[in-house]
Image (spheres, helix red, strand yellow):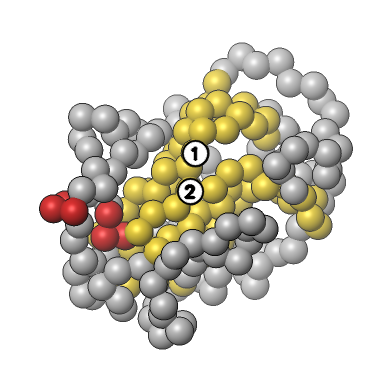
Amino acid sequence: MASSANSTAKVRRSHHRAGPVSGDPAHGRVTVRANTASATIVGPGSVDVWLRSSAADTDIQVTLTEIRPDGLETYVQNGWLRASHRRLDRKRSTIIEPRQTHLEKDAAPLPPGEFVKVRVGLYAVAQVFRKGSRIRISLEAPGGDRTRWRFDTASTNGAFLNEVARTTMWPSRLVLAVVPGVEVPPSLPPCPGRRGQPCRSYAPATNGG
């Protein structure tokens, strides 16, 4: 997904604001600067994006990863949403956990040429981001990265454009549940070494994100 070229990135974590970021207009990737202290997250999260699409509907995948000080990138968690299902259940949703109604009567196409707020939930996870690590969030089309199942997504043939704004007027953000006071072992875990969390060498995006 493409980001607005003249936007100013904003990414937040619950209870405190994450610092300067770099973004990737070509691939929808944003990376927060290195942590000055370890941070432990436990629970769900939310990727709140201001989205504009050339299509009436679009499927979104968000991917949260950790870029470690040793140059490796570890998968943390995913979230998915079809944009037409963006209507929230206000009674059940929280700042860290958006809950869509997924009711047929609430489904609505994206307004042409306009940015609208779409909250994509990250499934619950526990993860330690150690001092010196960076947090990376990627937005892409679902599919192609699961070994045993795939998504039933609409056929697009790559014929439309999704844009995500990151400005004062449209402040897209990442919200995570940070648990204070957790004692964190200083050494990094093996990579790979944790079930369900593959890792790879970190490759910067076109603008360093």
- The residue under label 2 is 79
The residue wearing badge 1 is 123
Q: Quadrant of residue 46?
A: top left
Q: Residue at x 75, y 48 (%)?
A: 198
Query: In the rendered view, would you say 153 is above or below 63?
Result: below
Describe residue 93's horizontal placement relative to residue 126 as left or right.
Answer: left
Question: Which residue lies at the image location 49% right of the left edge and 39% below the top edge?
Answer: 123
| Quadrant in the picture for the C terminus | bottom right
Q: What secondary structure is found at the residue carrying circle 1?
A: strand
Crowding around mark 1 (Cα neighbors within 10 Å: few <14, some 14 to 19, many 20+) is some
> Which residue type carries mark 2?
Gly
- 10 Å crowding of disc 2: few (<14), some (14-19), many (20+): many
Taking depth in this image into account, of 159 and 1 the one nearest to the observer is: 159
Q: Earlier in the sequence, mark 2 or mark 1?
A: 2
Disc 2 is placed on an element classified as: strand
Quick check: 106 left or right of 78?
left
Foreground residue, 9 or 110? 110
Discs 2, 1 touching: Cβ within 8 Å: yes
| Total numbered circles | 2
Q: Position of residue 28 (x, y in %)?
A: 51, 65
Task: Tell which of 106 and 35 is nearer to you.
Answer: 106
Q: Judge whether 177 appears above or below 148 on screen.
A: above
- Is 2 rendered above or below residue 34? below
Give residue 146's position: percent from left, percent from top.
Answer: 63, 58
